[in-house]
Amino acid sequence: MNESYNSALLDTAVAELSKLPGIGHKTALRLALHLLRKDPEVAIALGSSIVEMRKGIAYCPVCHNISEGGVCSICNDNHRDHSVVCVVENVKDVITIERTHEHSGVYHVLGGLISPLEGVAPSDLEIESLVNRVKDEGVKEVILALSPTMEGDTTNFYIYRKLNGLPVEVSVLARGISIGNELEYTDELTLGRSILNRTPFAK
Amino acid sequence: MNESYNSALLDTAVAELSKLPGIGHKTALRLALHLLRKDPEVAIALGSSIVEMRKGIAYCPVCHNISEGGVCSICNDNHRDHSVVCVVENVKDVITIERTHEHSGVYHVLGGLISPLEGVAPSDLEIESLVNRVKDEGVKEVILALSPTMEGDTTNFYIYRKLNGLPVEVSVLARGISIGNELEYTDELTLGRSILNRTPFAK
């Protein structure tokens, strides 16, 4: 297939766009032609926002969440409870949990989950820095908020063992039936777990 | 829903990305976080290729195809037959027809199709400039290569009427059964047309 469009500039933009996950060659061409049809300001705003974002955003040295230089806004927030640390897989999970407005503590972003199949070892993740935070900063509770998958459970268990002996409470997200879902369509494992972990019907 | 991610730079990039057609807020966030995980060069290459493309690409004053300044490479090519002009809806169709390697003439990009429903009038399209090209540049044949839709047929007929009386041949793409398709699944209109327009079985 001839991939040249009589314009090296268009070729380059299409090639760069098609490197994005889930965007193939045809979609990249459609997006590029869309930008060519619109006012120049639209494309320039998009292109420079991407460059500015990548240049301006770094990672917080404390929790490894994204930050626009130095310690992130969550770690800098004195109204938050710095003795409760919620451990998440990635930056997206920080956003997801922030949206619930149920966590008033701080975070620790691991940067992935232990996965021997994908070659992710504990040393590739921010586990040691978590242990050091617990040791040095008077953390009272670590909430493990990882995905309920095999990799998540392995990582939970690894962290639990690493924190063993330290004066810290380790908790994990409750597992049970999803609110709003039909019982009929809940998988047996989750349903079984929700029976074992049933809670008193209060209020 | 809270759309802020503790970083104005990330917010802006996500907002700009989600202006693209077919890219919603969630996909935009996924793309932005993907770019943050990769080396800075990846995001900078993408962002600047978009800016460079939009700044560097203009439209050819002759055929209205994209061009990196002045007359485009197809109109500038002396090996092509400038007396045969293929009329297409948009820049993408030029690429599609070029890929067939069956057209050795030049192009004329209309920039759309006549559509009263979507408020596109003949004056919004490059029809007058086509008529002027035919009058002034000794064009011998105009090939109408528009989509076989109601809008395409309306535009075909309008251009045909406009060129009426000028010493130019007007042809239209052959319509018939698609090569490789089962006859069983061909729509009746196309099949009927292909019987009416049957060609001698030669060679």
Image: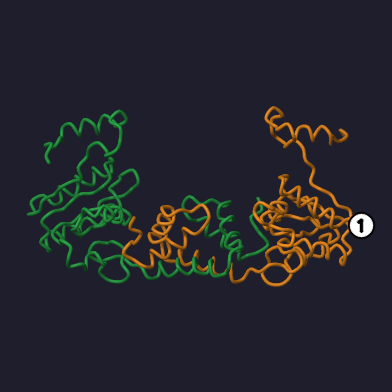
Chain colours: A orange, B green
x%, y% of residue A7?
34, 66
Looking at the rendered structure, the number of numbered marks drawn on it comes to: 1
Residue shown at 66%/51% (left/top)?
A117
In the foreground, B17 or A58: A58
Residue shown at 30%/28% (left/top)?
B184
The answer to whether A109 appears left or right of A17 in the picture is right
- Residue type marked 1: Gly
Element class at badge 1 = loop
Residue shown at 21%/68% (left/top)?
B76
The answer to whether A92 appears left or right of B153 in the picture is right
Which chain contains the residue that carries disc 1?
A
Residue named by callout 1: A165
x%, y% of residue A49?
54, 66
In the foreground, B12 or A181: A181
Q: Residues within 10 Å of mark 1 (few under 14, many from 20)?
A: few
- Is residue B63 placed above or below B114 in the rendered structure? below
Q: Quadrant of residue B141?
A: bottom left
x%, y% of residue B130?
19, 58
Q: Quadrant of residue A177?
A: top right
x%, y% of residue B34?
58, 59
In the picture, the quarter occupied by the C terminus of chain B is top left
The answer to whether B71 appears left or right of A197 in the picture is left
